Amino acid sequence: MKVLVIGGAGYIGSHVVKELMAKGHKVTVFDNLSSGLKQNLFAENDFIQGDILNTTDLDAAFGRGFDAFIHLAAFKAAGESMIKPEKYSVNNITGTLNILNSATAHDCKYMVFSSSAAVFGEPQYLPIDENHPKNPENYYGYTKLSIEQFMAWYDKLKGLKYAALRYFNAAGYDPEGVLYGLEQNPANLLPIIMEVACGMREKMKIFGNDYDTRDGTCIRDYVHVTDLAIAHVKALEYISSKNESLTVNLGSETGTTVTEMVEAARRITGHAIPADYVERRAGDPACLVASAKYAAEKLNWKAQYSDIDTLISTTYNAYKKFNSEKK
């Protein structure tokens, strides 16, 4: 298939592109490079530098004719979304509506969207399945839930078939070491741990150690980015072959505390990784763990690379490789 990957120069996007190529799809990347990197592009693919807030850019891209597109161009820092909701409204909501309008205008019928476990909010039960109530605790999660609702309407009214993939916590790097372009200004746990381990920052903060968890720090379900990339390709093949939309949770089904992740990183990297406990952040649920049974049933998908050691070692290898080339 001819696939347009919006946000394909980013962290997750580049891994998705790599997996699409491995399965024989013809890929074009659309990215404004605000957080994506030219280093993450593959020479075999066409690249369009454009912005989802510019409808002319989108119309020119979709005018090339694509069978499907993958949308990974949202802002994703939950904490920041509580401080700057207008930034998330404009990019995530307005930008996505621009994409939907341009895609349907150019008869692009299949869409894979990177949604989030943030749509659920504080768990009412664990593990969290697809039917769990949706009550986002941060504005980022609200934007993702809104987009899921927009897609359902565009399916009903325009025939756009979509897969909404609700990631839990994306982490790790390409196990083959081909991709190692680092996220710019990371807000997620593992990249921050690695910046401390590699001397890029002096110490890190752990937000809250008084949660009702086994060590007082938040529990999250970390899923390897390569596992996510595999799921994107499987989801695209599912919706295009079945001509039906799909919403699935993607996680490892294992919960890891922040402190456990830091201690494992100390063990694997051999670095001290200084960390201070500070106040909780607004909008952080105590525990998020996925049920991925529906993804297994529908997509024959199961996390293969999402154990803690693989998550940490692949990330550490990427940071070492990136920093050694910078010297």
Image (tube, rainbow, N blue to C red):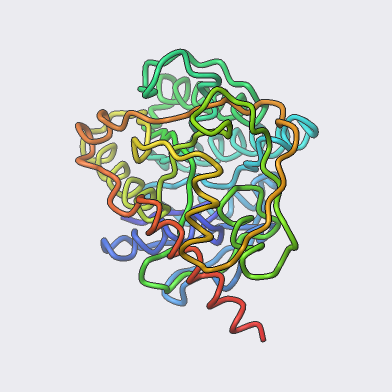
Residue plotted at (46% across, 54% down): 4
**Among all residues in the image, which is located at the extreme bottom?**
327
Q: Is residue 186 left or right of residue 296?
A: right
Question: Could you say which is closer to the camera, residue 62 or residue 85?
Answer: 85
- Residue 172: x and y in percent read 46, 57
- Residue 230: x and y in percent read 32, 52
Q: Is residue 126 left or right of residue 197?
A: left
Q: Is residue 49 above or below residue 280?
A: below
Q: Quadrant of the N terminus?
A: bottom left
- Residue 159 appears in which quarter of the rendering? top left
- Residue 112 appears in which quarter of the rendering? top left
Q: Is residue 323 above or below residue 24?
A: below
- Residue 164: x and y in percent read 42, 33
Residue plotted at (55% across, 42% down): 258
Question: Could you say which is closer to the camera, residue 32 or residue 128?
Answer: 128
Q: Is residue 263 above or below residue 100?
A: below
